[in-house]
Structure formats: C-alpha cells, structure tokens
Image (cartoon, rainbow, N blue to C red):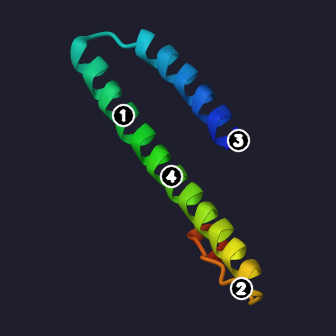
Amino acid sequence: MTQFVQGRVQQDMSAWAKLVSCHDPNEVLDWQRHYAEKATSNYIEEAGKLSRLAMNMATEGFASIRGGEPTVVAGPESRAA
C-alpha cells in the first residue's frame, strides 16, 4: 500500500509539472484525460490487489478456525512468477 501511495504521489507531482508546460487549452484537456485514465487504472488495479489480500486473510482465518488448509486466492501478480 505504501509503495502504491508513493508511486501515485510521484505521478501526481509529475502530472502537475506536465500540466504547467501545456501551451493551449486542448493540450491541457488531452493531458487531463490521459492523467485521469492512468490514475483510474492504477486505483482499480490496487483495489483488486487489496480485495485479493482481504479474501486470502479471511480464508486463512476461517480455515484456522475449522482446522483445515486455507485456499489462497491467486492474482495476476502470482502468475507472473
């Protein structure tokens, strides 16, 4: 989560620098659209990671109560390995 926030802050600062360098309103609108699309994509991806983490924690908790083996919910980051 900390890495995500740090990355977003860096991207936000970079976006402000880019926005200030725009020369006309159309360029500003294009950059804002690009920034919003990228930020939305980042937030959706991070929400998916957090959701999988919460599901894994809940599954492990329930399995330990029942005394069984937990079933881990795999995400795309685990398939890349």
Give the residue at the far bottom of this rendering. 68
Q: Quadrant of the N terminus?
A: top right
> Real-space Cα distance between discs 3 and 1?
20 Å
> Real-space Cα distance between discs 2 and 4?
28 Å
> Real-space Cα distance between discs 2 and 3?
34 Å
22 left or right, relative to 54: left
Of helix, strand and loop, which one carries label 3? helix
| Earlier-in-chain disc, 2 versus 3 | 3
26 left or right, relative to 2: left
Is residue 55 visible in the rendered image? The answer is: yes
Amino acid, disc 1: Ala
Q: Identify the residue at horizontal 26%, vertical 22% (top origin).
A: 29
- Residue at label 2? 66
Frontmost residue, 63 versus 1? 63
Q: Identify the residue at horizontal 36%, vertical 34% (top origin).
A: 36
| Mark number, residue 36 | 1
> Real-space Cα distance between discs 2 and 1?
45 Å
Q: Identify the residue at horizontal 74%, vertical 88% (top origin).
A: 69
Above or below for 39 versus 76? above
Above or below for 65 versus 58? below
| Earlier-in-chain disc, 4 versus 1 | 1
Above or below for 81 versus 57? below
| Earlier-in-chain disc, 4 versus 3 | 3
- Residue at label 3? 3
> Real-space Cα distance between discs 4 and 3?
14 Å
Is residue 81 visible in the rendered image? The answer is: no
41 left or right, relative to 4: left
- Residue at label 4? 47
Give the residue at the far left of this rendering. 26
Amino acid, disc 4: Ala
